[in-house]
Amino acid sequence: MFTGIISGLGRIVDVRQLGGGAAQGLQLTIETPPGYLDDVHEGDSIALNGACMTVTSMLAEHRRFTVDISPESLDKTAGLDQPGAVNLEKALRASDRLGGHLVSGHVDGIGNVTGFAPVGDDWRELRVLAPATLGKYLAIKGSITVNGVSLTVNLVEDRPEGCEISINLIPHTLQNTSLGVLAPGQRVNLEIDLIARYVERMLGAAG
């Protein structure tokens, strides 16, 4: 489990095919901030842009670790098949503060950035078109995870092509996550609120 509170900004520095080719998936090498891996071991879970991955090897002296990502995960996520910045979050400990919301690290869908404009002097408004199938889980003042970051939905607009949401990003989020470099047309990983998923299941079962 995770909270959507990013604990480090990393970078995918190497992408290699596993086994005989693309059908076997990829091995990613991620570079981390200084000291980030001090309490990390092989087999630990770390979320990359909101997708839960398992640490397969450590190069702590070089501030790097590797993960193996399957073809299925590559098909269901965005931004994990090429070098670039990634949001990092270590798995939640039972004693940790729940600063964001309950996040499973399982990407529910890929959204498309439709707008990213200034709001006032420092804030920015992020607009994302989510798949129509996720629209019923999105609500004003509800939670959503975008590339692993726990955020609050400000506006929801259902459209024929999907559900567009608006989110305000504060300067701290822009400076400490990869969301600050987003641009219209880019794809992002989305995870809906875990509680909303269970509410839908319970209501459906009752019917």
Image (cartoon, rainbow, N blue to C red):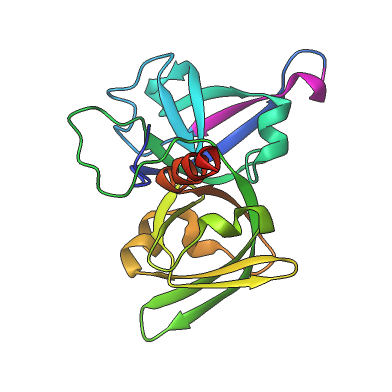
Position of 141 relative to 80 (above/below) = below
Residue 152, x across and y down, in percent: 39, 63
Q: Quarter holding the C terminus?
A: top right
Front residue of this view, candidates 171 and 206: 206
Front residue of this view, candidates 104 and 82: 104
Residue 74, x across and y down, in percent: 69, 34
* Left or right side of 162 for 205: left
Residue 161, x across and y down, in percent: 75, 66
Residue found at the far front of this picture:
207
What residue is at 34 percent from the left and 27 percent from the top? 37
What residue is at 42 percent from the left and 40 percent from the top? 88
Q: Quarter holding the N terminus?
A: top left
* Left or right side of 79 for 166: left
Residue found at the far bottom of this picture:
120
Quadrant of residue 77 within the rendered picture:
top right
Position of 135 relative to 122 (above/below) = above
Inspect the magenta stretch and tell me whether residue 111 lies in it: no
Residue 120, x across and y down, in percent: 38, 86
The magenta region covers 21-30
Front residue of this view, candidates 63 and 160: 160
What residue is at 44 percent from the left and 45 percent from the top? 199
Quadrant of residue 129 within the rendered picture:
bottom right
Inspect the magenta stretch and tell me whether residue 27 lies in it: yes
Residue 52 can be seen in this image: yes
What residue is at 51 percent from the left and 49 percent from the top? 147
* Left or right side of 161 for 129: left
State the count of labels.
0
Residue 131 can be seen in this image: no
Front residue of this view, candidates 53 and 42: 53
